[in-house]
Amino acid sequence: MRVLIITLATLFTNFVYGQTNNIIPKPAFADDLPGGFTLRESEVIRLEPGDSLQRAVATQFLHRLAASGFGSMRVSNQNGRIIFTKDSSLPPEAYRLRVDPSGIELTASSFGGYFYALQSLWQLSSDLRLYDSVSRKKYTPFFKSCSISDQPRFGYRGIMLDAARHFFPVWYVKKLLRVMSFYKYNRFHWHLTDDQGWRIEIKKYPLLTAVGATRKETAKGYYSFHEFDGQPYSGYYTQEQIREVVAYAKQLNIEVIPEIEMPGHSLAAIAAYPALSCDPSPTEVKTTWGVETNILCPTKYTFRFLEDVLTEVMALFPSRYIHVGGDEAPKLAWQKSAFCQSLIKEKGLKDEHELQSYFIKHIDSFLTSKGRRLIGWDEILEGGLSAGATVMSWRGTKGGIEAAKMKHDVIMSPYTYCYLDYAQGYMMDEPLSYRDMLPLDSVYAFDPVPATLAPDERRFIKGVQGNLWSEYVSGPTAADYQLFPRALALAENGWSEQKSYPDFLRRLKYHFGVLAKQGIKASTAYYDVQYEVKRRSMGKYFLSLKSKDSSLLIRYSDQVNAKSPQWQYYKSPIALSENSFIQVQPVSNSGAIMGKLTSRVFETSLLTGLPYQAEDVSKRYNGGSDYGLTNGIRGQIDNEFTWVAIGTDNLQFSIDAREQISPEQIQINFLKWQSGGILLPTQLKIEVSADGKTYRTVYLAPLENRLYPAKYIYTVSVDNPGTFRYLKVFGKNYGKLDTNYYNQSNRSSIWLDEVFVK
Ligand code: ACM
């Protein structure tokens, strides 16, 4: 019986792990067949006479081979074993691909179909030389036999690149388009304007780029902090470059959708033409991130400006959709503006939200009159959705659901699954990125069609898009890191009906090689090791190490600064002493380095590994874990991700030690960071209790927020607090910030870490 099971498992393995199982996104139907086809230069490509779509894709077939060092092949209308066949019954983008020892056949009804048949063909080979246009060694590609019949789940599969916060050169945009098309993406959403830069040449308004494409400096570090690099930052695309990119994308079956932001996120335009604002006093291109309150004023002048700009934009971009932003437009300026208030009255509008809706409807009519369709972020729902608008749902899926119920088209791009500027792994180990975490498995888990939609509403979900905002993505290398491999997971969400994460991960191993050959350093954060301190009993703490990729081994060392440390392989939880340094490296079975080396210093105390209860702790940073205050990792002054951030309310938390303890000291560490509006509680109370009913106050005092240094750690210590089991801490928030803080809420927040009871 045992023998039989092994044999079956082997057969099964051979079947499942055929070459069609290299393909990302996963095809709808694929059978692996025996043998394969060896491509030689003597082979001929046979096209149907006069079919320019087939010819265009065949040309790309030849170009890729030539670029990789393979010689040239002939094209014919009579004979040949690499056959392009038209089947008009196939839907757009659908294709069939057959490979067997007698030849290759690519069947489709459209350019996209032939193009995707070719992308799948490339992926059928496991020969990475196909993607190597650097070493160009002579070789003979081999394609495994198979039969594939494939079509996308969604017609819209996009990536958005924010070229406003940071500028990306044309060569990089083209590279991104190439890689996107390899994974069957068909839309490139180009975020071209924002508060921090206007990046598209508009002939009628030359100041947009002469003034709006440059900011005088850029905020350093995470966005709420007031430190600047002092370096002017510029960049824009000429109209000629834009035409070049649009034409290039078309050859890759990608439509480029421009985004011109309105009425918010428009400070770069306002800096160039202050009359666009309700407050026409001069202003500058924004140097910090976040939401800007100075927005476009809905005057005749503004509408004429936007129509002029969009006219030039439409001449450059033949796309059906024109994206007009619409997100994050605070209504403060409109509330204060006499013009807006009288416009609201004149048009019979209810409020400023209806004024935004009026604004978007005006632009929608204009675009519709030119044969285009307006698309905008889900805020365009507020105050009434314009008739022809498509909604891009980013604040979760709620906006998308609402729009679909109103029978409007929807593109799903919720930040919870699709924001590729978020950190891919534990933030302490990642480059500076947006503060939320979005690991690969979470991206993969996304289903763009919400289960709450009725069957007849689901058809309004037209697709899915990943967004790369670029506040913390300063250039091509950083962009590659943030995009890959998560963009591959999203590609599968957009294309494939049937998904399996373990199978995706197995295919991903091959694609890491493919990406590397194309000069992409993808993130391997999903290999990274998670550290978890577990408490067995009072004073006994053990560290568990786990990689999300369970096929990896983990080696670790406690040697600090050793040139070649002595490694041990992790087998079971490691006992921690009061102070433990540990560095960790995931490796493959054969000992190859996989992903990052990371390290931690652990300091344990009597409360380590015990959860804390709190009402309002930011879900970000360590606050997301119940063990943030007791994970053994002390908050570090230069690493904001080691802190537990309490929102803008008072601090209140408690910890149950689970038995009576008589420690020598209670110690709580707070961060004070002036420019971020992070202040010590103005009053702190620490209480302890033996029974959880009657509490004794062991500390009650005001804390002083010194102005200097601007950033420091303040430790509150209580010696000999007596015997207790329960600890309770209250801190009074400083409240409204009175000086020139950069903080959206204009209230102080409290950050602390860690709580030690020794
Ligand atoms: C957005 O992230 N503000 C669309």
Image: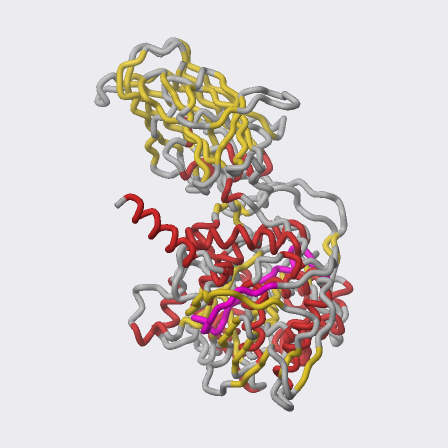
Task: Give the total number of marks visible in the rendering.
Answer: 0
* Horizontal and vertical percent position of residue 17: 45, 56
Q: Is residue 472 above or below residue 203?
A: above
Q: Is residue 578 above or below residue 679?
A: above
Magenta stretch: give its range: 142-171
Q: Is residue 626 magenta?
A: no
In the shown orientation, is residue 230 left or right of residue 349?
right
* Horizontal and vertical percent position of residue 562: 63, 21
Residue at left offset 43%, top offset 40%: 550
- Residue 480: in sight, yes or no? yes
Residue toward you, 744 or 569: 569
Residue 449: quadrant of the picture: bottom left
Q: Is residue 143 magenta?
A: yes
Residue at left offset 68%, top offset 65%: 174
* Horizontal and vertical percent position of residue 399: 40, 65
Instruction: Specify the quadrant that holds the N terminus.
Output: top left
Residue at left offset 61%, top offset 69%: 260
In the shown orientation, is residue 169 left or right of residue 557?
right
- Residue 301: in sight, yes or no? no
Residue 41: quadrant of the picture: bottom right
